[in-house]
């Protein structure tokens, strides 16, 4: 199975960035989550909204992508094609992660000011919208640069073969 192209192979216009930011800010308002991050499947931070994270967002983005990749393999081992959402609960902080069109991961960081149910409900409502915005940007980038290939095109396929 081939993984999607990373964010390094597309670019956002100011209009794209504004639209994504508005969607994330609306999600935060509706869900009462603290922060929303958009991470591409190769581990690069695309953007975030809400409270500025107090941690290294570069490391966080990389670990988020690795978390999703590891869980994709776990899903296959139990006969599922993938897990499209992941939830990690801590004593004070929690996070909900959702796959968006197999291209990016939407991460919501939240505390006890809200509930998992509300965050999950509001996240489900915006996943398709974020997916459309990302796909539009990717299609525009590919049309403008049709010869561009991923930097390491066979790495994802090789990793998948290791787990089969």
Image: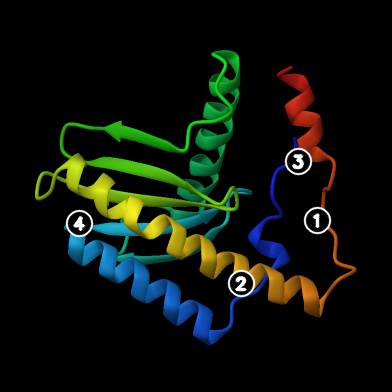
- Which numbered disc flags the more N-terminal residue, 2 or 3? 3
Give me the C-alpha separation between circle 2 and circle 4.
26 Å
Farthest residue, direction top = 78
Crowding at mark 3 (Cα within 10 Å: few <14, some 14-19, many 20+): few
Determine whether label 1 and label 2 are within 8 Å by CB: no
Q: Residue 82 occupies which quadrant of the picture?
A: top right
Q: Residue 10 occupies which quadrant of the picture?
A: bottom right
Q: Position of residue 163 (x, y in %)?
A: 71, 19
Residue, x 60% and y 20% (percent of image)? Answer: 76
Mark 1 or mark 3: which is in front? 3
Give me the C-alpha separation between circle 1 and circle 2.
18 Å
Determine whether label 4 and label 1 are within 8 Å by CB: no
Mark 2 or mark 4: which is in front? 2
- Which label was assigned to residue 105? none
Give me the C-alpha separation between circle 4 and circle 1.
35 Å
Farthest residue, direction right = 147
- Name the residue carrying label 3: 2
Name the quadrant of the C terminus: top right
Mark 2 or mark 3: which is in front? 2
Mark 1 or mark 2: which is in front? 2
Give me the C-alpha separation between circle 3 and circle 4.
33 Å
- Name the residue carrying label 4: 31
- Which label was assigned to residue 150? 1
Question: Vertical placement of 21 versus 106: above or below?
Answer: below
Crowding at mark 1 (Cα within 10 Å: few <14, some 14-19, many 20+): few
Give me the C-alpha separation between circle 1 and circle 3.
12 Å
Residues 149 and 80: in front is 80
Q: Position of residue 108 (x, y in %)?
A: 32, 51
- Which numbered disc flags the more N-terminal residue, 4 or 1? 4
């Amino acid at each position: 199975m081939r993984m999607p192209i990373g964010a390094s192979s597309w670019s956002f216009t100011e209009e794209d960035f504004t639209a994504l930011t508005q969607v994330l800010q609306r999600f935060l308002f509706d869900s009462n989550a603290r922060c929303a991050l958009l991470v591409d499947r190769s581990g690069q931070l695309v953007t975030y909204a809400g409270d500025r994270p107090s941690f290294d967002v570069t490391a966080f983005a990389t670990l988020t992508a690795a978390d999703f990749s590891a869980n994709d393999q776990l899903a296959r081992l139990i006969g599922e094609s993938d897990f499209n959402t992941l939830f990690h609960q801590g004593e004070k902080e929690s996070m909900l992660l959702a796959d968006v069109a197999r291209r990016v991961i939407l991460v919501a960081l939240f505390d006890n000011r809200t509930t998992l149910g509300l965050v999950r409900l509001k996240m489900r409502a915006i996943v398709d919208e974020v997916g459309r915005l990302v796909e539009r940007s990717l299609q525009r980038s590919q049309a403008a640069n049709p010869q561009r290939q991923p930097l390491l095109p066979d790495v994802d396929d090789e990793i998948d073969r290791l787990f089969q």
